[in-house]
Image (cartoon, rainbow, N blue to C red):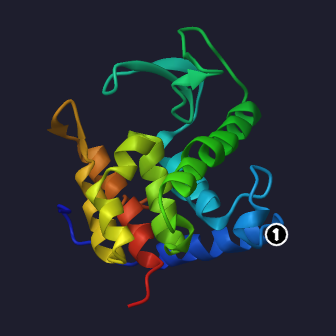
Amino acid sequence: MPINKITASKRGKAALAAAIVAAGVGGWQTFKDSTPATPPPAVVLATNTLIIPWEGLALKSHWDQFAKIWDICYGETLINGKPVQPGMSFTKAECGAMLKRRVFNDYYMPLVRKVPKFTNFPVSVQAAMVSGAYNFGVGGMIGSRAMALALDGKYREACEAQTAWNKAGGQVVNGLVKRREMGDAQRIGEAEVCVSGLTP
């Protein structure tokens, strides 16, 4: 269960509306229109609101002390199927293009293919789950209590259940609590976005 109270917010609702507009401007209208070039609103929302601000941008590879692994760009740990190595570098544009492709192909589409009715979940729930999958893995997301609750139509409970993924090395990490719950002054949290798209 969450450590803090989870509530819908104006910034969460605004981010959701902006993602829907951006997807529409990009040419998206239905799931059948989805490609990395015209991603659905859930991918736009997850990428722009939940992944980029929390992962941060590293143009040169660096050591992640919590995960004990090298990463680059927006938390990429694999490049062309191989682990990130010391001394690697990319431009901001290269990192952005890589992130956009990976979020769609490696996180959104596996959830669509493996979870019945995933595209019927509210966009905000889909986005929070895509962001969670990006951070702790598709398998973890699919097998999570949050997913089981969403499949039962218990979306608010699903949003709150995802907050359990707040540990690294067996310890609760304040940054992960913020990322999973209500964010901070500059960044929106996954549960905040998740519940902001639900009807009261």
User: Is there any visible trace of residue 150 in the rendered image?
Assistant: yes
Quarter occupied by the C terminus: bottom left
Quarter of the image for residue 154 reads bottom left
Residue identified by numbered label 1? 25
Query: Which residue is located at x 76 percent, y 53 percent?
Result: 35
Give residue 78's position: percent from left, percent from top.
56, 23
User: Is 148 placed above or below 139 here?
Assistant: below
User: Is there any visible trace of residue 22 in the rendered image?
Assistant: no
The number of numbered badges drawn on the structure is 1
Query: Which residue is located at x 22 percent, y 72 percent?
Result: 5
**Amino acid carrying mark 1 in the image:** Val
Give residue 133's position: percent from left, percent from top.
44, 47
Secondary element under disc 1, as helix, strand or loop, is: helix
How packed mark 1 is, by other alpha carbons closer than 10 Å (few <14, some 14-19, many 20 or more), is: few
User: Is 126 placed above or below 68 here?
Assistant: below
Give residue 134's position: percent from left, percent from top.
48, 43
Query: Which residue is located at x 47 percent, y 58 percent?
Result: 115
Give residue 97's position: percent from left, percent from top.
73, 39
